[in-house]
Image (spheres, rainbow, N blue to C red):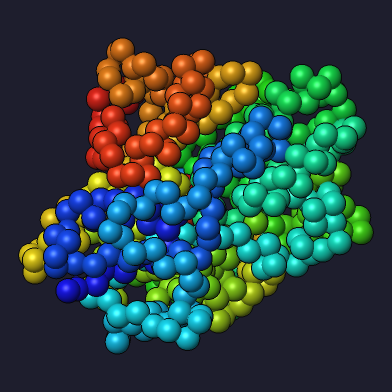
Amino acid sequence: MKNLAIIGGGTAGTTMSNKLKKYLPSNEWKIMVIEREKEHFYQPGFLFIPFGYYTRNQITKPSDRFFPKGVDLINKEVDLIIPDKNMINLKDGTSIDYDVLLIATGTRISPEDTPGLKGELWQKNIFDFYTIEGAEALAGFFKTWEGGNLVINIADNPIKCPVAPLEFSFYADDYFTKKGIRDKVKITYVTPMSGAFTKPIASKFLGSLMENKNINIVTDFFLGEVDNANKKILDFGGREVPFDCLVTIPLHSGDPVIAKSGLGDEFGFVKTNKNTLQSLNYQNIFVIGDASNLPTSKAGSVAHFQADILHENILSFIKNEPLKASFDGHSNCYIETGYGKGILIDFNYDTEPLPGKFPVPVLGPFSLLKETRINHLGKLFFKWMYWNLLLRGRWIPIPSKMSMKGKIAD
Amino acid sequence: MAQKSYAGVTVDVNEEGYFTNPSQWTKEIAVEIAKEEGITLTDQHFAIMEFLRNRHLGGEALSIRSINHSGVIDVKTFYQLFPGAPLKKATKIAGIPKPASCI
């Protein structure tokens, strides 16, 4: 019997356990997933919690429900990966040997890396919505807030789900308008990028959307520190933005175990071949999802598209054949824009988001880079797809390779 | 593609003035681009530009955060050396493409 170990049972790890169970012969391979958490969050739902649209219970299910039969779930914490010995040490002192290792340890916020961010105002006037605790605390704050400067700040890239901060600002406009205090809430979006988004066509579209919604934007701002006493954020060059409520998207890092095991870049993301998803340093280690250092979005849709090609490469590796399947950087995001509408973007390593129809030319039903109600419904429907299709490694009606079909490129 | 002349050498640049072929870069050229940006280059400038070039040519993404890991200078000094938008200015002068932050 050979061992395939998956570290991390989040979106990427769970999906892969389902795929690999299907393709690896049970009499030859034992699959195990090491996951310390007992709850699985539908993370796109975090965005909705501060505005009271979802509660914790509506986006949480027990993790063990989504692993297939015959996969060993090890509910423990990893202490160290020792790639030269093909071994994983667990915090309880036991260890696991593997023949193939799949790293799916994700990413986490590290607010402690910015001076003052986790200061006295943390969870009083400063909140994140990338953790369930942060999102719930912000919901509590918004309930009684009477208005002031609402600042949404991305500390620096990379971050998980790069469109979430935009969606947050659109939802804030919607929420405070409906509450009747929009005139008392000044919304400012402070970003290290030179526009609302990185890719030019989408950035222009989203920038004008922000203008229409009366959301101010401050660009090229790299967060240096937070001044708690004077309620200001400062960039490294000394530029200041005052806040009454700061919604922070802190710096992101890989799981500490990656850095500790010597597998990461300086932020703790695993150095990974951007096409084959194999580790750059060890042939029997593969990487999926947010844990890698690939130049694409850290998002569930990306993990899903990666899963579609990764099982082929793992099978090829096991058979000692060349790795033929190639990931193209495909990413696909619904962006909620408030008032029951949304937009959709679709892109990869080489092609920026373009306008058009998706997934079927002319018919859609979804419109790319355009605000429509059906795009919003698509996002709501995605929650069902996530629990029932995506995590279980089932077919989803979007091809893993990005397509130019239906898109309009000048 | 546009071209520009620095220190008597013609180089390929994009519409924003960033090099499209980093191998055309020399230190003499850097001095002239820096002048356009109002910056007089010192050894410290060259040291951090070398870090940025090596990283870029090694296929790694550039970010403000990575400066703290350069072992050359910290981010605050980086801002003093290239005031305003340091990463944009430094990459332009260092003859490498403008960093497109991953999304």
**Foreground residue among A393 and A288:** A393
Q: Quadrant of residue B53?
A: bottom left
In the image, residue A68 above or below residue A225: above
Give residue B27's position: percent from left, percent from top.
44, 72
Residue A207 can be seen, yes or no: yes
**Residue at (60, 56) in percent of width and height:** A156
- Residue occupying the far top of the picture: A363
Q: Quadrant of residue B19?
A: bottom left
In the image, residue A348 above or below residue B57: above
- Side of B64 where B61 appears, left or right: left
**Residue at (91, 55) in percent of width and height:** A230
Give residue A23's position: percent from left, percent from top.
17, 53
Give residue A12's position: percent from left, percent from top.
38, 53
Number of numbered discs on residues: 0
**Foreground residue among B23 and A8:** A8
**Residue at (45, 79) in percent of width and height:** A90
Give residue A364's position: percent from left, percent from top.
34, 17
**Residue at (64, 74) in percent of width and height:** B74
Q: Quadrant of the N terminus of chain A?
A: bottom left
**Foreground residue among A107 and B9:** A107
- Side of A239 where A253 appears, left or right: left
**Foreground residue among A140 and A218:** A140
In the image, residue B24 above or below residue A372: below
Residue B23 can be seen, yes or no: no
Q: Quadrant of the C terminus of chain A?
A: top left
In the image, residue A259 above or below residue A190: below
- Side of B58 where B92 appears, left or right: right
